[in-house]
Image (spheres, helix red, strand yellow):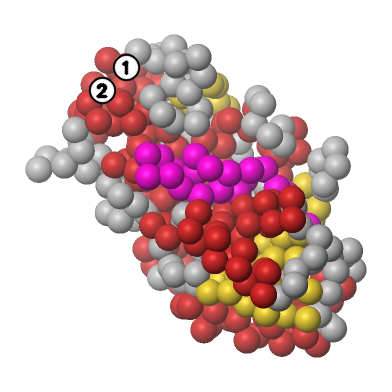
Amino acid sequence: MLSKIAVNLEKNSYQIAIAPNLLSKIGEYLKRLDIGNKIVVVSNSMIFDEYGNQLIEALKSAGFSVSYHIVPAGERHKTLLSVQKIYDTALENYLERSSTFIALGGGVIGDMTGFAAATWLRGINVIQVPTSLLAMVDAAIGGKTGVNHPQGKNLIGAFHQPKFVLIDPDVLKTLPSREFRAGMAEVIKYGVIWDQDLFQQLEAAERLDELDYLSLELLQTILTHSCQAKADVVSQDEKEGGIRAILNYGHTVGHAIESLTGYRLVNHGEAVAIGMVVAGKIAVKMGYWSEEESQRQDELITKAGLPKTVPHMLAIEDILETLKSDKKVKAGKVRFVLPESIGKITITDQVPPEIVGEVVKECQEKG
């Protein structure tokens, strides 16, 4: 059950491979690539304890020289200080321009490792080996790398495409349920913005809140469809000059919620889920989307066990203020990604702040 997806770019095209038990075969895949001999694996202690030795053994069996670097787990450690420590390990192990970082972990590890690769010696290779559903379907693909600034998420970063993305669904067996649900937010996003068939398959599923309730076939479908959607969009717009901005559906208000809660109260997927509910209601109020389709989206979010309400302690004024520093602001105007139908989206900077405030208030949980 091997799926291969091509990310076709003008220069740095690469493949995504998806199949069970793929982690043990990584050495065979990487030997075919021009990535030098020296590799530093970047991970956190929990992931490394589960899969680090298996990965390193597979790489050493293929003839690679391998060392590793452990980063503390959590979004709050996605900082320039953490990247500085990755640089220190690269220096200690004499990494050259032909050398490679491997990101073994979720979105935080993937973003930081990609940024370290983009900036060390002005750019070295990076391989993405995502271990969370969210990273598999989103963060590991597309070359967006970065770290957080105290004033906002991913404000410091670079575009740096991986040389290869290896996805082994078997590693999801050790993923905490909350993190699995967080990944489902991004899967639902792809259904809304790009893939009507995926959306309908999610609707047909009995439950989406736990990995154990998904058949192997449905899991493979979710991974393949989501990765194909991301690859299609990135292939058309590598550096977010146009259509790629649709991938930010749910992220505008979502990022504000993450930032204002210090990246501790809600995780990225939960914030995106809330952001999609808000964006859907804005789209209905502005006449872009039907109430019925907005409800269908919200029902999927509920089925995936994700939150739909803005945390009660957040002031609406603070959310509106935080939106002004979002990366997607252009000429002082916040750009919103809004649905027109399942599988079709529009981008507009014509959403009045009053409507945003009104919808956020409607969606806010009662304190």
x 48%, y 23%: residue: 329
x 55%, y 60%: residue: 84
Label 1 element class: helix
| Left or right relative to 160: residue 348 | left
Residue 152 lies in magenta, yes or no?
A: yes
Residue assigned mark 2: 357
Label 2 element class: helix
User: Against 221, is 287 above or below?
Assistant: above
Q: Amino acid at mark 2?
A: Gly
Q: Residues at badges 2 and 1 in contact (C-beta under 8 Å)? A: yes
Residue 224 appearing in the image: no
x 57%, y 54%: residue: 111
| Left or right relative to 148: residue 43 | right
- Relative to the observer, which residue lies in front, 295 or 147? 147
Q: Amino acid at mark 1?
A: Pro
- Relative to the observer, which residue lies in front, 33 or 186? 33
Residue assigned mark 1: 353
x 75%, y 69%: residue: 95
Q: Position of residue 188 (x, y in %)?
A: 49, 45
The image quadrant where one finds the C terminus is: top left
Residue 151 appearing in the image: yes
Marks 2/1: CA distance?
Answer: 6 Å
Dividing the picture into quadrants, the one containing residue 312 is top left
Span of residues in magenta: 144-164
Dividing the picture into quadrants, the one containing residue 318 is top left
| Left or right relative to 39: residue 68 | left
- Relative to the observer, which residue lies in front, 162 or 16? 162
Q: Position of residue 79 (x, y in %)?
A: 47, 54
Q: Position of residue 96 (x, y in %)?
A: 80, 65
User: Against 277, is 160 above or below?
Assistant: below
